[in-house]
Amino acid sequence: MPERALLAPSAFFQLTDAVLKRAGRQPLDPDGPQRRIVAVNPRDRVLQILAGPGSGKTEMLVWRILYELLVCGSNAETLLVTTFTRKAATELEVRLVERCDAVLEEAHRVGVAVDDPHVHDVRVGTLHSLCDALLREFDSHYSESGTQLMDEHETTVRLARDYRFQLGYSSANAAPRAGNLVIDTDEVAALFRPPWEGDRWPSNDMQRVELLKAALAQHTETWMPRCAADGTLNGIEAVAPAAAGVTDALETLYSRWVDYLDENSVIDFTTIQQRFLERQGAVLSELRHVFVDEFQDTNPVQFAIHVGWLAGPGTRLTVVGDDDQSIYRFRGSDIACFQGLELECAKLGLEFRLEKLEHNYRSTNAIVAFSEAFRTNSVLQMVSMPKHIEAAADAPEGQPVRLLTGDWSQLCDVVAAELLAASPSPEATLVPDAAVLMFSTSEKNTRQRLSPAWQMRTALEDRRLRVFNARNKTAGEADSPVHDLLALLSYLIDPVRTIRLPGKTRAVQVCASHQDRSRRPYAEAAEPKYASLAHSRFQTRFRKAGGSSLDNPPPERAELLEFIDNIRQELVRAASATSDRRRLTLSALVARLMSYRYFRRCGYTPQLFRQALFTALLEANVAPTRRSMRSLDQPMRPALDANGKVEWPQQYWDFLRVMGTMLESTSLDDEEVEAFSENAIAMLTFHQAKGLEFDHVYVAATGRNVMPANALRTALFSGKGVPYVVTDGQAETTDQEILRLAAADREREVYVAFTRAKQHLTILLDSSHSRTELRTLNPALSAIFEQLPASPHPLDPSVTVKAFPHTVLGGSR
């Protein structure tokens, strides 16, 4: 096979600069770090790129990949690129193809000979998907077993359905099992309890599943790579006598979970990392250069995988990230992985090179200066790797960064008025490139007050501005297709009836899964072996909508209920007639339901994609994996028992139990459909905003308390015995290092939010709000704004404005 025509380094950089100029970007600075980063030196084994916000890290990564292909002559299939999300993988792959095509076109135009490197063959994806693909290609045992990678929905469903039996958990008054030590021990649960949950968490199936899944992930991703080899106990045991034996319990749970996965030829996102680490040797000879994006969000098992690549002869590793943007400790990442790479390379005797990208090409001078002032006034100055971010040489000065203080409802109105004024069209048919960033964008309301996110969205929509909030947490609430479709399936299997029982003066509700067992004999369906009443609450809300009674639902709903009654009768008749070959599957029934006008009328709105969300949840509940729909294609075959009651197979009761508990106990997000985010003001959490940028950014809820549980959990599962106590269900410690790490985690979230802004940045504060994070300003922000003069906002004098730099006071934009 003839050798490929390659480029000389000088020719490569000439072509690169020409392509960048044609794309409207600055060429690579010959005197700065950019060309050093792009060039793959012969002695390079490990390159770590410390890249500040807006510094063009993706562009540098793409050009370094192309240098490896076009100058070094590596085959495309020997290069592997990992990203944090599927969306990031797609964007990087598109950029890589576009830049490669542009280089080849420019080379042809100027008469430079170079062969096509087949850039489409570069392996790009999330680490989970790449582990799956590599094992499938190079590990015969994995491929021959037919193992399939599950998504998060199916993992949750399988745990909910089987954790008591497969892993081992006993209900009250029964002998405790391995799962009880993890779930029922306050010192363990407090490390994983969400800060908004009370001290009775976990109190139902889905909360127990949430705790088990998180504990197993932390055990697999942190304890196993750091402690398993030398048998170091989990640090919890050193400081919490009630948790004695938790290390062995977690090992037992992990072993049982792996056995369960192997028996069913499936694997989850957490376990596949450990499985790949064990079998990585089968792949090492196939790869020449591994590139890791967002390396600051690496967890210990991923760190072990990436360092493991270096066991391959001559395999290179390039990682890029920013420790100031590491915000996923709550998912198991540990900033110590990013900051400790140089030390690890020294231990292994490997050449290491650190380069920095410190120019922000995204934001104005004012925003960059403000972001640096925030870093300087926060704990990040002490715990981060040294760097100094500056605006690009041609960056505009820009408007001052503002702090708006007032009542939350007034702040919402001011934000809406400003964005309406900034709209490209008077009728707001086009909206400005803008985002409102909050620690939480849940729109779920409570009895005490309206959700702040709901108030903000309402204020924006009242001005006819389109808004998209995928994390509204309302996708499963009443009147959503997710809610109503489960209600109808609940009615099919376990219809709730109102009857007058003997000796009772008034009618009561009965169903086969009722918690009052004395009512079950009067139900239409036969009593199941295991059941839950959660699903029936969806059914009764659906039938009693708008103040109707259970037996007299609204007309458009009565039509659907009558259809379900007919389906139930036909299913029983068809199942009892041996000659009747008619069949109806669960998926076909849902498809028929969604053909009714009640569901079709939603049009192209989020409601439509909530129907798609229900289908995804349905598949996760009944399918062996999301890739195989065999269970959805099995005909439903209820029968009549000796008492004339409808008898359903246990799998349908399991479906109602898991699905009902999931929807009742889990706040569901909308599907993230890009078409809905186009020409819409984005409402995002700080974590969602990572990797995005907007002209206008409003940031609220910067003042949440320091929550040490995540940093504490990392230390304990790394075998460190850090003392802590449990107060009102939350883990608390006085350990200064843990508190410093937890404070840094909080500041990084806020820093990520600020650095999304390109032209305008505004911070919102309601100093009298009931929520701490809204009424309190982040301490580093207080240090910046407390001495600055205030002025009334021109649109609402009750809202005050402070501006940084204070030489120019902000007003209406």
Image (cartoon, grey):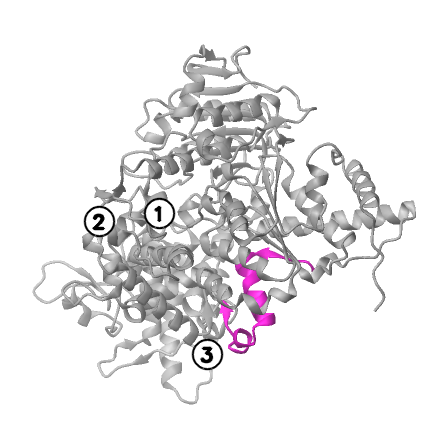
Please tell me whether mark 3 sits on a helix, a strand or a loop: loop
Q: Earlier in the sequence, mark 3 or mark 1?
A: 3
Can you give x and y, in whole percent of width and height, for residue 156 in the image?
39, 61
Tag 1: amino acid? Ala
Q: Nearer the viewer, residue 532 or 239?
A: 239
Q: Is residue 437 visible?
A: yes
Determine the residue positioned at 29% across, 48% down: 721
Residue 615 x/y as whole percent: 47, 61
Residue type at numbered disc 3: Arg
Which residue carries the number 1 mark?
715
Viewed as shown, does residue 11 lie left or right of 715? right
Tell me: residue 145, above or below residue 727: below
Name the disc covering residue 200, or none.
Answer: 2
Crowd class of label 2 (few under 14; some 14 to 19; many from 20; radius 10 Å)? few
Q: In terms of secondary structure, where does tag 2 sit?
A: loop
Instruction: Give the structural element (helix, strand or loop) at label 1.
Output: helix
Say which of marks 3 and 2 sits in front.
Answer: 2
Residue 726, position as x, y percentages in the image: 22, 44
Q: What residue does disc 3 label?
A: 583
Q: How many marks?
A: 3
